Image: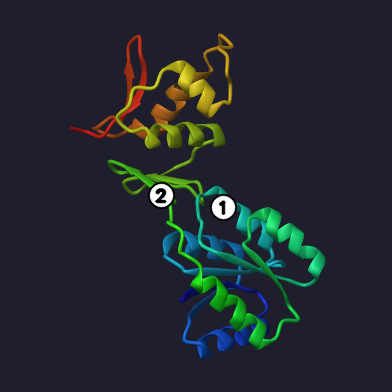
Amino acid sequence: MRILLVENNKQTASVVRADLKDCGHAVTVATNAVDALYLAASQEWELLMVDRTVPELDGSGIVRTLRSGGVTTPIVMLVNAADESRLGLVAGADECLAKNFTAADLKARVAALGRSPMRAQPQTRLKVADVEIDLLTRCVTRGDRHLALQPREFRLLEFLARNVGKVLDRSTLLKNVWDCHFDPRTNVVESHISRLRAKIDRGFEVHLIHTIRGSGYCLREPA
């Protein structure tokens, strides 16, 4: 199995990696949250093992971020005490393993997960023309330009990209981007579309965000 181990304690990482390699697994180690999220999103893994006490963004935060970004790879969280298991499971881990585990415990748990049917790995990136959207890091680029989007602008762009080529009316955008099930009679959609268009299209010859008069808005690939 291809396993990503997220563990900042070098001694623990070395022991776990050696035990897993003895069973023929290929193990890559990430020692911090930034590297963990990047590697988890940019490569394919059959199992993720995440330490509960990773600095910066703890193990639960890493798992929540991965799950919210659509990563469904099986995750084992390594915890210091049994009462931390609940936190790991609530965050989205499939299994929790207390750190007093033996090599036999570790190998058996990994083998069991390896026998489980692999779940389909959904997209963690969206691409429309030369716009790329990383759903985990929330990074957006067009060509070689990084685009700094506010959270609501990101949600708006993501929804447009998931419905590329479709004309989306104001009510649909309010419901799916703002969680509004009624029309508040404000210009919130129009103002956000205007700001998003300025960031996505300004300075580029080909415009991707289009207003369909009387109908709505559309993110469209160039013909």
Q: Tell which circle, 1 or 2, labels the residue nearer the N-terminal end.
A: 1
Residue at the spot 63% in from the left edge and 87% down from the top edge: 15
Element type where label 1 sits in the image:
helix
Depth check: 202 or 142 in front? 142
Residues under labels 1 and 2: Cα distance?
14 Å
Q: Looking at numbered disc 2 in the image, what kind of residue is underneath it?
A: Arg
Depth check: 143 or 19 in front? 19
Q: Is residue 32 above or below residue 14?
A: above
Residue at the spot 33% in from the left edge and 49% down from the top edge: 144
Element type where label 2 sits in the image:
strand
| Residue farthest to the left, as pictured | 223
Q: Residues within 10 Å of mark 2 (few under 14, many from 20)?
A: some
Q: Is residue 222 above or below residue 84?
A: above
Residue 25 appears at what percent x and percent y?
48, 82
Q: Quadrant of residue 108?
A: bottom right
Which numbered disc covers residue 125? 2
Depth check: 85 or 218 in front? 85
Can residue 13 be seen here?
A: no
Residue with the mark numbered 1:
67
- Circle 1/circle 2 CB separation < 8 Å: no
Residue 55 appears at what percent x and percent y?
69, 65
Foreground: disc 1 or disc 2: 1
Depth check: 64 or 130 in front? 64
Can residue 41 be seen here?
A: yes
Q: Is residue 15 above or below residue 161?
A: below
The type of colouring in the image is rainbow
Residue at the spot 51% in from the left edge and 87% down from the top edge: 21
Residue 37 appears at what percent x and percent y?
54, 60
Task: Tell me if 168 is positioned left or right of 18 in this view.
Answer: left
Q: Residues within 10 Å of mark 1 (few under 14, many from 20)?
A: some
Residue 210 appears at what percent x and percent y?
32, 23
Q: Looking at numbered disc 1 in the image, what kind of residue is underneath it?
A: Arg
